[in-house]
Image (cartoon, coloured by chain):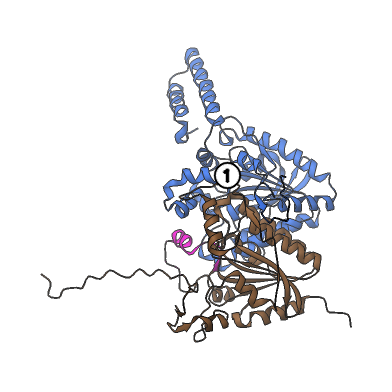
Chain colours: A brown, B blue
Amino acid sequence: MAWFKREKRPMAPSVEKPVRVPEGLWIKCPDCSEILYNKDLAANLHVCPKCAHHFRVSATDRLRSLFDGAWEEHDRELVSLDPLGFTDTKAYRDRLTTSYKATGQRDAVIVASGRLDGLDTEIAAMEYSFIGGSMGVVVGEKITRGIERAIARRCGMVIVSCSGGARMMEGTLSLMQMAKVSAGLARLDRERLPYISVLTDPTTGGVTASFAMLGDLNIAEPKALIGFAGPRVIEQTIRQKLPEGFQRSEFLLEHGMVDAIVDRRQLKAAIASALRFMLPSRAT
Amino acid sequence: MAVDTLDFEEPVAVLLKEIEALSMLPRTEQRAGEIARLQSRADEIRGELYRMLTPWQRVQVARHPNRPYMLDYVERLFTDFQELHGDRRFADDGAIVCGTAVYKGTPILAVGHQKGRDTRMKVKRNFGYARPEGYRKALRAMKLAEKFRRAIIVFVDTPAAYPGMESEERGISEAIALNLREMAVLDVPIIVVVTGEGGSGGALGIAIGDRVMMQEFTVYSVIPPEGCAAILWRDSNRKVDATDALKITAPDLLGRGVIDSIVPEPNGGAHNDYDGAARLLDVALERALREVSALSSAERLDLRYQKFRDMGRLGLDFADASPSVPRADA
């Protein structure tokens, strides 16, 4: 018989809560536990005013934070036809329908033309709530069309990545989207037109190993998870825990993989000044 | 030769064991006849088995430890092979081999994954898992080929890019991404052949070309079946289901426009007959090179762009549901 009775309390699972801003008036910052008024948070571009924690934002909010005003969305109605007829524990078609109902989007990216600080710009913003922001044929097609439009309009291209990588449910065709978008970027590159890649939490897998790393400037938001292999896969390979901060923006900056880490509230200004450096100067 | 058969080749394995036992005994006319009879029966059964392989069985064949690797083909198809080591940045990656060689009288550059046959070589080759420096070495060598106007032949056979800490530290994503972009506009003919496992980004990182072919029993996938099963089924034992669902076999991918052609393999797979496999590959390579070399450089680059631009086809793989746009199939 033990002298002291140990209180049996199961360890709380340390699952990270999704940091999506929920419906409701108040929200607690997962970093500093500050209670924040939802509208204030939105007005602050979903960045915690106390500790600068960056909440994940929707593609629409992203575009709103970068464009000067209204924008023209392209290829809004492109939909996947489920090329493999894929079913795992659930049919892929049903996943598409569920995501469509939840987000109002047909797939995981919005591509739009508009003005960024007065400059004509093409922006693709990925939507994480749509099957983890994964890239299948529709994402690849819309972004490539965006790049081709940027070439035709002689303007800069911005891609804001937020994605778990290639979409398994479209198989090897998803993998090929990496090649497709990168081929588009090769043309943009040879045309000497600017491409700014913005890496947000999370940017992993085939998205990182294609367009997200190909920016003339690669800009990361603070503390974003950015990597090729998922942390769990790496831990299985090396059979040990990964160090704190591994595959975070700061780690990538230290290893020379991103040009800068920029707070979301300064992001638009940073992109604008980069575009001004890269776009041909107006003849005076 | 050691009896090295896959589980589904059990009927063949039985015969091979019988042959082995007979060959231990003193040779007589009658025994030799018996051995020949058993051998032809084994070949026949193997032929039948390989005509109806399931997708998972193809994965097993693609990963077969005796599968010929890049250097086995280099030896049989090319002369004057001179390996080029190192990325001139950090290291020499043993999992990707590059070298100049002569193919039918013309200098070419050969690039490919190499897995290693025995334990020591497997470690040296890192089991075919390339690190960033492998992709950077490949790009360096390919730029060399471009500078001196030599065609490039690529052999793809990797489980994946190496998912370790140093890969992330040294920028595996950037290394692969840059190859995708630069290979799209590299101004010399590039012929790619998948000779084993086409393992996602690790494969694609050297697999952009004017022709992409797959050997008959190889696979090319966005994720290994085990990984897909673990994520979507939450059970890596459902790998057979995942393999079926992912549609990663050569006929599947030819049908979806991902590859241009299938290179036949000898009876019972390339691992049963290296020379036969090399002869069949030779025919396909020669033809692909001839076709692609006949194009002007502008045509070739346009066609290469269009080839990858068409991955995902309107009306087949995706549709435009907006009411104002007429349907592609209407």
| Residue most extreme to the bottom | A50
Indicate left or right for A107 with A15 as reference: right
Where is A16 relative to B215, above or below? below
Magenta run includes residue A243 = no
Can residue A32 be seen in this snapshot? yes
Q: Which residue is drawn at 48% across and 53% down?
A: B227
Task: Give me the residue at 44% from left, 51% from top.
Answer: B233
Residue B119 appears at what percent x and percent y? 48, 49
In the figure, A264 relative to A134: above or below? below
Residue position marked by numbered label 1 in the rendering: B248
- The 10 Å Cα crowd at callout 1, few under 14, some 14 to 19, many 20 or more, is many
Residue at the image point whose x is 65% and y is 40% from the top: B255
Work out whether residue A3 or residue A110 is closer to the camera in this orientation and state it.
A110
Quarter of the rendering containing residue B288: top right
Q: In which quarter of the image is the C terminus of chain A?
A: bottom right
Q: Which residue lies furthest to the right in this view?
A: A284
Look at label 1 and name its amino acid.
Ile
Residue farthest to the front, as pictured: B323
What range is drawn magenta here?
Answer: A226-242
| Residue B9: image location, x then y, percent | 47, 31
Please identify the quadrant where the N terminus of chain A is shown.
bottom left
Q: Is residue A240 left or right of residue A170?
A: left
Residue closest to the eye, A172 or B267: A172
| Vertical order, A156 against A91 (above or below) | below
Image position, residue B294 (x, y; %):
84, 44
Query: Which subunit holds the residue at mark 1?
Result: B
Given residues A6 and B29, the one toward you in this image is: A6
Please indicate whether residue B227 sits to the left or right of residue A70 in the image: left
Q: Is residue A277 above or below residue A234?
A: below
Q: Where is residue B143 in the image (x, y as percent from the top left)?
A: 75, 58
* Magenta segment includes A240: yes
Quadrant hosting residue A110 = bottom right
